[in-house]
Amino acid sequence: MHEAIFTNKNYYQILSEQTKLHPDKDAIVMGEKRLTYSDLMAKIDATASFLIHQGVKKNDHVALWGTASPEWLTTYYGIIRAGGVAVCLNSNYTINDVAPLVTFSDSKYVLFGATHDTKGKSDEAGILSRVFKLSEEKIFSYLETDFAKVEPVEIDDSKWDVKDDAYIIYTSGTTAFPKAVLTSQYSMINTLLNYANAFKSIRGDKVCVALILFHVFGLTGSCIYLFSGGTVYFPDKIKADCVGDIVEREKITDLWTVAAVYQSIIDSKKATEQCAPYVKMCVIAGSYTSPIQFTRFEAALNHATFLNVFGMTETSSGFITVRPEDPISVRYNTIGRKIPGVEIGICDEKDRLLPEGEIGELVTRGFHIKNGYYKLPPEKQAIDKDGWFHTGDLGVITQDGNVRIAGRIKDIIIKGGENITPGEIEAQAIALDSVKECRVFGFKDRLYGENLGACITLKEGAEFDEEALRKHLKETVGSFKVPAYFFVFDKFPLNATGKVDQRKLHTDMLIKLRMRELEGELMQGFTVSSVSIKNTSYAIEPLIYMIEGYALQFGLDAKHARRVKLASEEMLVERIINAFDDVGDIHLDLVCYRDFFRLVFKDSGQPYDFEKQRKTSDSAKIIAFAADDISITTDSNGNYNYNLDFLFDSDFDIKSFLASHERLL
């Protein structure tokens, strides 16, 4: 086992050392852009000097918003070199999504590049100024601004403590508002030096980082190679063909990305042929990868060793990893052992440490832990009284020190009182040749409290055989763990980090489940709204506008919706005028069926002979013209129901609408 590596050097000092050794060597390459180590340091110096001239002081928060590029990385280093704290923002977010993150982080300056929401727009700084509520003098494009135009500033490294806050990365978890994780250079540098040392024996000199930089995996993957004199290559886009092109052109040996990108590479014959001859080491992180997936990846990229790394934003980088020399059984079935210098453990729900072999929450402590969650009180820092950081992951430590992850604590499904971990079901599902991906989620169930639904994607050309999958799962995980429903997707939604967007997929599954339930309910009629009013004219207006609103939501055009409104208004007028001698109640139900919706008018007034009335009453004639069908029925009490039916447009899917909007209706 390697000894722990520790240094008190900062980013700038480490990069300066590499620049002295390799001044003219390529440091960062993207397309036609090539920065040598000398170029890299010059840009960092220029950026830091510019920011200091603009008034950036020690510990000022400076937002950094843009896509992965050489300029993003040099700007990141420049902010920290100037004494600022780099606030890394999601480049896939819209301006309005980013605005609360800028505000929450108390960012005093914004440096932006190409984002999906700003590129191609004129007056970008002005737009950002108005939305972020910052002066335009505090907002700069790092792609357009000439940072070198100011006088260089001599920076005294002795003023900076490497354990001070260096950057903020927002978590991409499932909380309503992401946590802002403050981390120091000391934590990040020493963590990545130790876990990079774990696979030093096969690490090459060139790496393709097919990752975003505003999250820790992409950022640390880039830093590892720059801190050791290597060359970092960014693909033009994080897509299989772009990765394949740059790997083949530059003969790159190392590849860092997430499982979804590796899957897209092996799904592409061209990308596989481009990568397979050159790639020797593949680092994978960001989500659970099953043994079956590892087998498929290594079979396709047949010269590569795949290494699983486990880490979190809060742990600065990976702190558990497999080693190249580990047997396949370890590399495929575990996330490996801890890096030197950190502690890990498994604890129960009362924060008591458990012996090896027992399952519980994975906890860790040491130099790699975050400085803190910005603006959150001590009780919400996820660190207990003994200094253990709680990861939220269920795991077990084996006798040889390797860790198996069973899943996230919050993902556990409790069916009939039994705890079920989705991961074991997912791993067995993709063991079938036809199944490409699987995710299992819980849903509310009257019998068991919770039950299981499985979302799957299929391999190209495969057909879904539900009976075969059920049989396989029954034999491997047991009958009780076989999902009640299976839902086939063309592809899973991904978030900005390249991981499967669990929240979106779970929501999509619940919508599909509700659509199945609605199929039966729509046969009988699904009541969307039920309202009672007094038989007075002033009560009509709000009701008829509500009905018109529903008609528009159901996809009817404005003209058709006005017909619905007119028919309901005239029906109400008829009942008010003809049905009652005194004050009474009129009840209205809006009921949806597969192909139409029905307005059901109920009251205890005098019966309404529609056929007779339509010969003499203008209101009855209008109703007959506006409604697609009219019927009169009686309820169990002998009261009459007057039904006006309106057809949906042919392309309107009422099941999808109700499944998506039911909570709002």
Image (cartoon, helix red, strand yellow):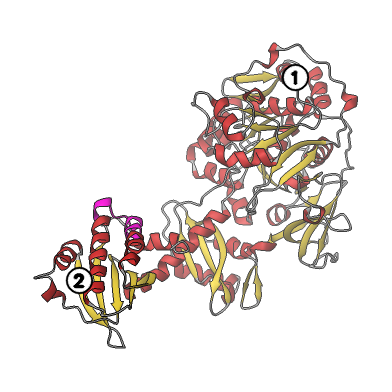
As shown in the figure, which amino acid type bears the numbered disc 1? Met
Q: Quadrant of residue 566?
A: bottom left
Where's residue 34, x and y in %? 63, 20
Can you say whether 220 is above or below 620 in the image? above
- Residue that extends furthest to the bottom in the rendered view of this protein: 637
Quadrant in which the C terminus appears: bottom left
Where's residue 403, x and y in %? 76, 57
Q: CA distance from mark 2 to mark 1?
A: 79 Å
Can you say whether 355 is above or below 211 in the image? below
Q: Residues within 10 Å of mark 2 (few under 14, many from 20)?
A: some
Q: Nearer the viewer, mark 2 or mark 1?
A: 2
- Mark 2 and 1 residues: CB-CB less than 8 Å, in contact? no
Number of marks in picture: 2
Circle on res. 630: 2
Q: Is residue 618 visible?
A: yes
Q: Which residues are magenta?
A: 548-560
What is the secondary structure assignment of the residue under circle 2? Answer: strand
Query: Which residue position holds label 1?
Result: 41
User: Of 413 and 435, which appears nearest the observer?
Assistant: 413
Q: Is residue 431 visible?
A: no
Left or right of 130: which side holds 567?
Answer: left
Residue found at x 28% / y 51%: 558
- Residue that extends furthest to the left in the rendered view of this protein: 615
How would you classify the magenta stretch by its main secondary structure?
helix
Q: Residues within 10 Å of mark 1 (few under 14, many from 20)?
A: many
Can you say whether 8 is above or below 257 in the image? above
User: Of 81 and 19, which appears nearest the observer?
Assistant: 81
